[in-house]
Each structure stands twice: as C-alpha cells, then as structure tokens.
Amino acid sequence: MTAEPRGTGPRGTPTLGSLTGGQLRRLGAVAGLSETDAGTYAQVLTEALGPVAERPLSLPPPTRTFLSDDHTPVEFSLSFQPDAKPSMRVLLEPGCGADSLAQGGRIGLEAIRGMARRWHFTTDALDAVQDLFLPPAPQGPLALWCALELVPGGVPKVKVYLNPAANGAERSATTVREALHRLGHRQAFANLPQGAGHPFLALDLGDWAEPRAKVYVRHDHLTAGQAGRLSRTDSGPGPAAIEGFFRTAAGLGPDTTGLGRRPGLSCHSFTDTATARPSGFTLHIPVRDYARHDGEVLARAGRVLCHHGMDASVLERALTALTERRPEDGVGLIAYLALAHQRDRPPRVTAYLSSEAYAVRPPVVEADRRRLSVS
C-alpha cells in the first residue's frame, strides 16, 4: 500500500487528526516507542480531540486556543535525561471545538473521566478542586487541558492543566492557595516565588510513583539573576546552573538583561503533604520570542543538551519528524526550552514542540530585530 502524504486522512484530505496523529507516530519512533504503542497513542489523541479531529485543515482552527501560537490544540514535548531515551508527551485541549469556555470545560472533564474509566485510575485530586477551576461561567484563556506522557505499553500517564483565573484573574492567588490546601499542601503557597500571576495549576492523575500538584508562576521581564533565585527546593541545580541555562536558552548577550517580550515561567511541584517544601522546580524559557528562526533555537538547545550529557541529535530528528520545512524558514517550532529537577533524580531538559497545523510564524528579518530586544 502506498503511504499517505503527511497530514492527510484516509481519502487524502488533510485533517487536524491525520496531521497530528502522523506527527505523533513519527515522533514516537524518534523517542523509541514501538510502532504498536505509537499507533495506539495516535488513536488516543484522535479520540481525545473528538469531532475536530476530522476537521479539514483548509478551515480555520476550531477555536483560538491559548495552547499554541497558531491555535493548534496540540503540542508535543520531549524530555531528555543523560543515558536514556527521551520521554514523550502530548498536550491537548479536549474541548477545543466547544461554543463556550464552560462547555469546553465540561467536554474536557468528561474526556478525563472517560480516560479514568478506560485505564482504571481515580480522579480524586481533580474532584477535590473541580469547583474552583470549572465554575458555571469561567473566565480566562482556558478551561482544561490534558497532557499524556506516552510510556511503553500503550497506557499513558495523565495530567490535567487548570486555569487559576477561572473566577477572575484577581482571584488567581486565592484559588491556588485554596486548591493546595484541599490537596493537603496546607503551607505550600507560602513557599512559591513572587511573580506576575499564576497561569496554570497541574495535577498528576493515575499511575504516578509520586503524584504532583504543580503550580506555575509568570515572571515578566525576568533576568538571569532573578531566574537563579526562583527555586524553592532543598536540592537541585544551584543559581549558577539556572542562570547559565537561562542565558544559553534565551540567547542573551552581555548588553541585555532580561525577557522583555513573552515572560518566563517557573513551576514548583509538591508531592509530600508532610512538608511545605516543593519537591521539584522547572524554569521555562519561551525561546520562540528570542530568536530569529528555529535554526538559532536548535543550536542553543544543542548546547544545553550537550552541557547536560544528553544527545542533541535526537532533537534534530524530532524536528524532521514534525515537519519538512527547514528550521531557518520559521520560528516557533521549538516553543519553550525548560530545565527541570525533581528530588532524587538527575536534571531534565525539555523541548516543547509546535505542531504548526495552521500556520508557520515567519523568521525575523534583520530590519525587525528590534522585536527581539530585551529590557
């Protein structure tokens, strides 16, 4: 049988599901998943997207989702560790075709409950905070996202991303504090760094060795020195290591000080209710806003990966699996680079990869380099 072109359905019509499913299969091969597992996960992705999976790519995005710059409701990521195959994840918005944020939240919640029934896990953590994040008339840029960590065996690890601004941005901190309290982390909020807002709270559901509650904080105009002081964990990379990652990932020169465009994000994870201290820390750099094109980002990512003893060639193969375009022909294929540390584990470097189902952001030409200025 002749292979279908990339991103086409059974009858040769490009659809959201056929494109992203094909990308998942090819990325799965790069990450070391078996063909069977990759096929299973591609089907899971299609089912989770629901009817919009059959939506032709000739139509506009089903909604102006906050999940990606071109409003594709799917994002991939590869997480690297030394001497190991990368772990692969897909982030998606199950309710992306809904008529309202409230309906999208209901569709997303039912998708999570369907996964729980299928893979026999509980949703206790989500149930405990559901009313805080999925009110009758939610506000903000999202209702519920779902992330699947694609492990061998065809049964993913599941997490949900929730919106602390669902009851108003001014109540985000109160919402996060109350959620942590209900989840047993009663003193955890006091250990979070200061920032400009709380864009996400994420919860591990199902078969995790240590289920996490993860709190994200936005940091406007973040500098390397500030980034080095963000971690509240008792172990992990020190300030110098975090600053070094920040400068390499963002491509900051000696005359620049911080992120003047899209802000950086910190994330602290809490696993042990007996202590208020976080067990993990991640720094996310939105590299797509601080480079002329993806070739620059790929080179920076390669330096970060090699510095940590990881195979940079895997990321190059991953980009080829996602798209046939050259890295120099656009910017945004690598959306974020992140340095993560979880207690008693080696540091991880994660690259967040855009599907670009609907648009490719053009590279920055020399006359527009001021777009990348930092302050």
Image: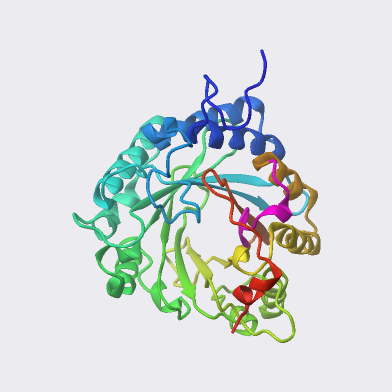
- Residue closest to the far left: 136
Which of 40 and 353 lies nearest the eye of the viewer?
353
In this view, 192 is above or below 363: below
Q: Which residues are magenta?
A: 324-337
Q: How many marks?
A: 0
Q: Position of residue 341 (x, y in %)?
A: 62, 64
Residue 119 can be seen, yes or no: no
* Quarter-of-image position of residue 295: bottom right
Q: Is residue 103 magenta?
A: no
In this view, 113 is above or below 134: above
> Position of 268 compared to 85: left or right?
left
In this picture the colour scheme is rainbow
* Quarter-of-image position of residue 309: bottom right
Q: Position of residue 133 (x, y in %)?
A: 29, 58
Which of 123 and 210 lies nearest the eye of the viewer?
123
* Quarter-of-image position of residue 188: bottom left
Q: Residue at x 35, y 65 (%)?
A: 180
Q: Residue at x 61, y 24 (%)?
A: 36
Which of 278 and 340 lies nearest the eye of the viewer?
340
> Position of 76 compared to 164: left or right?
right
Q: Position of residue 88 (x, y in %)?
A: 61, 44
In this view, 3 is above or below 308: above
Q: Residue at x 34, y 42 (%)?
A: 97
Quadrant where the image shows the N terminus: top right
Residue 18 can be seen, yes or no: yes
Q: Position of residue 21 (x, y in %)?
A: 55, 33
Q: Is residue 327 magenta?
A: yes
Q: Residue at x 66, y 29 (%)?
A: 34
